[in-house]
Amino acid sequence: MGNIQFIVESSGREQDTSAPGMEVSTSKIMGFIEQARASKRKCTNLPGTSAQKLPKPDIVKLGIGWQHYSYSYNTSSYHQVRSSRNKQIPSHDINLAYNKDYEETLQCLQDIFFKNGRNFKGRISEMELRIGNSAGREISRDGFTAKQYFESCQTQKKRIYLLTKIKAQHITSLDFSITSDSEESLPDLGSQFTENLLSSTLPTVTCSTPSNSAPQFTAHVTSPATSTPISQTSSNILVHAGTPTVTMQLPNTARKCIICADREIDAVIQPCFHSLCLVCGLQIQEHGRKCPICRGNIENVRSIFYC
């Protein structure tokens, strides 16, 4: 290989630097070239340079919530279910694909709030499920996509809600668990349920007026007439109310509370003396309701027991 001659400018004159000790190998020159290329690549990746931008993912970010329907006649609507000391309600954000449809979005919310198909409100099979907004209004299935819903939200924080409602055939008692943190769901009277109670045939109670000479009176309960006579058993029911003892004769089929249809009758309402279970009676009295049978005012609810 011949010698490579370098020309160095110094003080306006050229100097010949070719000398036997100034030989540069080919590998050294290639090293210089690689270093120059690496420096160029670093410069192109610095901030402010025109580096290639990655496409944004086709997803929307939505907050989630859950609203449950209350059948109470003065608040018949969806109410948000909130967290308490004993239960935590998910409230995080979720990412949904732009093209996720109504059923896929509903399934996503169902999996979050009803793990294993149930929660403290009941089984998912007993519920009617809908998608709604923060006002508790149902969202139409027609043309629904996650992107379309995101763009239609008028609030600053975009949220989507799961709306649940107990199916009519599964309603046996109505509760206030939405507005109360109590672990026990106590029954309440809904308009539809009250109408059924008033229209059904119920046992009648007739009481004689107690006198000073006779401090006791007897109440007779007659059951509705049927083709097959109902066997009756006599039971003495004592009312601890500071009043004369009340004795009633109830058939076996009349021992269940007419409100919840589950618990046994163990209380009476004063002054009308209509009977029901103590849990339902205290719940009705606490919320200032009237007697579900005669619609009379309730002065007190007294517990009873069978002798």
Image (cartoon, rainbow, N blue to C red):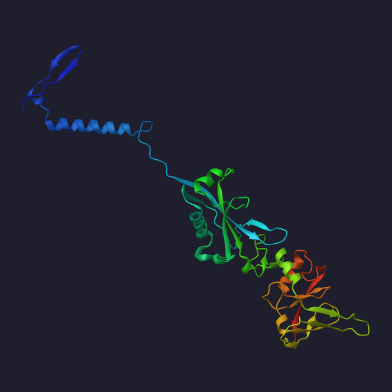
Residue in the foreground of this view, choosing between 24 and 86: 86
Q: Residue furthest front?
A: 227
Can see residue 283? Answer: no
Number of numbered discs on residues: 0
Q: Tell me where residue 266 appears, x and y as whole percent.
A: 73, 78
Q: Tell me where residue 261 appears, x and y as whole percent.
A: 68, 74
The image quadrant where one finds the N terminus is top left
| 112 to 145, vertically: above or below | below
Residue in the foreground of this view, choosing between 291 and 34: 291
Q: Tell me where residue 198 appears, x and y as whole percent.
A: 76, 70
Q: Tell me where residue 109 appears, x and y as whole percent.
A: 52, 56
Q: Residue furthest top?
A: 12
Q: Residue at x 76, y 83 (%)?
A: 250
| 268 to 71, vertically: above or below | below
**Quarter of image, res 270:** bottom right
The image quadrant where one finds the C terminus is bottom right
Q: Residue at x 86, y 80 (%)?
A: 207
Q: Is residue 137 left or right of residue 94?
A: right
**Quarter of image, res 16:** top left
Q: Residue at x 44, y 45 (%)?
A: 58
Residue in the foreground of this view, choosing between 85 and 72: 72
Q: Residue at x 8, y 22 (%)?
A: 19
